[in-house]
Image (cartoon, coloured by chain):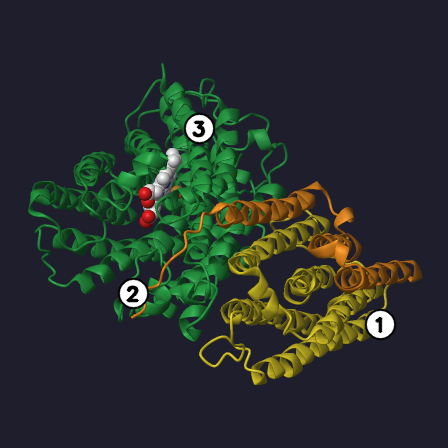
Chain colours: A green, B yellow, C orange
Amino acid sequence: MTHSAAQVSYLDDGHTLRSWLLSTDHKRIAILYIVAITFFFFVGGVAAFLIRYNLISPNGLIGSAETYNRLFSMHGILMVWFFLVPAAPVTLGNFLTPLMLGARDLAFPRLNLLSWYLFVIAGFIALYAVVGGGVDTGWTFYTPLTSFYSKGHVVAAVVAIFIAGFSSIATGLNFIISIHKLRAPGMTWYKMPVFLWSLYATSVILVLATPVLAMTLLLLAFERIFGIGVFDPAIGGDPLLFQHLFWFYSHPAVYVMILPGFGVISEIIPAFSRKELFGYKFVVWASIAIAVIGFLVWGHHMFVAGTSLYSAIVFSLLSYMVAVPSAIKVFNWIGTMHKGYIRFDAPMLYAIGFIGLFTTGGLTGLFVAALAADVHLTQTYFVVAHFHYVMVGGMVSAYFAGFHFWWPKMTGRLYPEMWGRVGAILIFVGFNLTFFPQFLLGYLGMPRRYFAYPQHFEALNLLSSASAMVLAVGYLLPLGYFAWSLLYGERASANPWGATGLEWTTPSPPPTENFAVTPTVTQPPYQYEHAETVSHE
Amino acid sequence: MSDVATHEFQFASAEHQRETAISGIWLFLASEALFFGPIFLSWIYARLADPSAFDAGARQTDLTIGIVNTALLIASSFAYGVGLASIQFGSRRRMVVWLLFACTLGLAFLGLKFGVEWRSDLEKGLFPGANFSIQGPTRNGAQLFFAFYFFSTALHGLHLIVGLGLVAWIISQARQFTPKRHTPVLIVGLYWTFIDIIWLVLFPLIYLIGRAS
Amino acid sequence: MTGVVVRLFAVASLMVALLAAELAAVFIFPAWGRIGVAIIAAAMVGVAAFGFMDLRREGPPVWLLAAAALLWLAILLGLGSLDPLTRTLYPTVIAAP
Ligand code: HEM
Ligand SMILES: [Cu+2]
């Protein structure tokens, strides 16, 4: 394909602020999202830092349990709704979906821009809620604590999450419809890259679970404002109804966090093993299975809450089923690497780290999904360690992996590879040293969400807090070298990794209309055995 | 305006764009259906807590208004359907008339629901809380019913107001639509009937189940 | 045009008839009971979806979306009510203050 000189890169198509803030180009919106998401990640990170700081000493260094409650609520709310849930879809997904489809944009570009504004408005309301006054309910907003007893800006926090939810729905809707309707000629469902399948599964959850959360939060706000409602036990209402509804959304939401990560890893492993993805159909159907089965397990968050024993047993069994498709994927990635020609560039280091961390998180998920074991482990640091392994170890590693992999495409620049590798290793080591001790602490019985703890837990907490500093350095490092790369990085070619996929056939950075000529797809993805080997410039 | 359908640059043709928009609204409606899910589940929970007291609350509602309102919404979907058919057969003027009629029926629903029914409910002290007027053993269950009632009808009413706004927008843009280009008319119509469908579920939950045996 | 209007009118009439049937199930034939009301209400929803929204005329992707909505609602309401339906309630004694 030849590129006429008339094609303007999307980065050069207008330099005014207006040309960014009113752009409907999915690539520009992705950049807008990256700015917003990164900001919330660091604000949430500051809260995390303060939590670990407090836990250095058994008596709590912050000195006030109230402040501590507000800190972990702030951390949870910002990280879940303003980083983990949206991050990968709205940044990588927005940038890549049309490129991978061979399309010029998403189906509804204006809706896409609207979703960014909703997100930013929601973000500022959330910041107002958690900083100017705070919320002390945790990210889970359980009733009746939240409706009747908690102090602070509960309604503002709820409104923020409600609005952010509609931003998610808009994004998910756009992806599903684009994938149905905008595939390039020849791109059948089974010729689609796995990233798009993952995004499709993610979007199904976003579109069908988020509205449930939205309405639940309205019911909660109603109860808090009028002092009475359907969750109010005083009139025979059921607080467990709130938990059911909340987890109907929030369990699938954990798969919203991880599924795009699965997609990223499935792109990277073949590219850096120079091999076709092993068991493509298993990988894609595993994503769909996760999206569906993920809706059948929410009761495992409520084993000790007073639900019926019968339903607890059903939910426990179903929870075991959801681990099967995740395990299938892990085996497929390892099968892809087997006998491959493996290159250890930063994206691949992150991807390999991801496999280990996600597997640890997933397997400990099975510990807590076992009804009997969970009675001991629930509400302890074991659960905290479990979900940080999947969300931070898993999702954030995959996000960073994808960011490094597609950075040249997004910016037209290469990042310094050596620093990328150092960052990946720092994050892997720092992460394990921070969170593995928490498995031990939880197993030994340290409860979560308390600002003080018995003396004999001090050593492990100290280790966790100290290692968190390593992790923090690991997360800050990319901020530095990515900024450097924007200014001084080497220019990237169209396909610096020698990867397959339509996004690599267009220049880096891509022109506004993505493809000069709409591409026609003839091959299945990941034909690495037949692709020319990478040139090491 | 000419009757040549145009399309945005990510689509291959105007037909492609139309199909995409229609799939989009259906997916949005699927999402909306789940949005009402918690309301339905909370009805189940609230009723299970004490069925006879809950039903006693439900029997305090105004069945006549409920029936009239249901009929109004059915008629408004019919009116909208005729409006849509009118533009498809080329009569823009007739479309506007039928859409205005659909709006009027929607407004009548709102007037009856909030102007008449809610007002009398509030006067009778049926809003849950300390001043709730039903005493005795059914008090709690009836309060639970009315918490559900006020919440769900308010939410449905808000959707209807949004729907009215959309229909008004279609009317104001009427000049643009032709037999070949009227996707927005179709899309708003789908949303309009969807609001009816929600009501068709709420109506028995509010007015009928508590009176049935 | 007339054909369409006649069809829409038939749909609306059918729905009004079903509304009347709902009321009959409550007041005239109590034996139909709540189940009868629920079945008729479901029928009304179906008539509206196929009659007014022309669900039949849309292609398979749209059917898939509509079916997904129903399936997911069924999951929410089904698994969601499993717990209250099978719960053992122990009598509580509220001590007098
Ligand atoms: C292999 C599949 C998984 C299973 C079987 C599983 C199981 C569980 C169980 C049973 C709990 C409740 C523990 C308790 O509160 O006592 C739990 C908590 C949690 N899991 Fe998982 N999990 C899995 C994967 C994931 C993934 C992939 C994520 C996120 C990306 C995740 C995020 C969470 C979160 C956030 C919580 C804690 C919520 C809270 O109470 O604040 N899990 N998990
Ligand atoms: Cu879960």
> What is the x, y in percent for residue A321?
46, 31
Q: Do the residues labelled 2 and 1 touch (CB within 8 Å)?
A: no
Indicate the chain on which mark 3 is placed.
A
Q: Is residue B212 visible?
A: yes
The three-letter code of the residue at mark 2 reads Val
What residue is rendered at 66% in x and 61% in y? B209
- Decide: is A441 above or below C25: above
Where, by quadrant of the figure, is residue B8 drawn? bottom right
Q: In this view, does A273 lie to the left or right of C22?
A: left
Q: Is residue A188 left or right of residue A467?
A: right
Residue B68 badge: none
Q: Are marks 3 and 1 in contact (CB under 8 Å)?
A: no
The three-letter code of the residue at mark 3 reads Val
Q: Are marks 2 and 3 in contact (CB under 8 Å)?
A: no
Mark closest to the chain's N terminus, 2 or 3: 2
Q: Is residue A76 left or right of residue A282?
A: left
What residue is rendered at 57% in x and 42% in y? A179
Q: Is residue A509 visible?
A: no
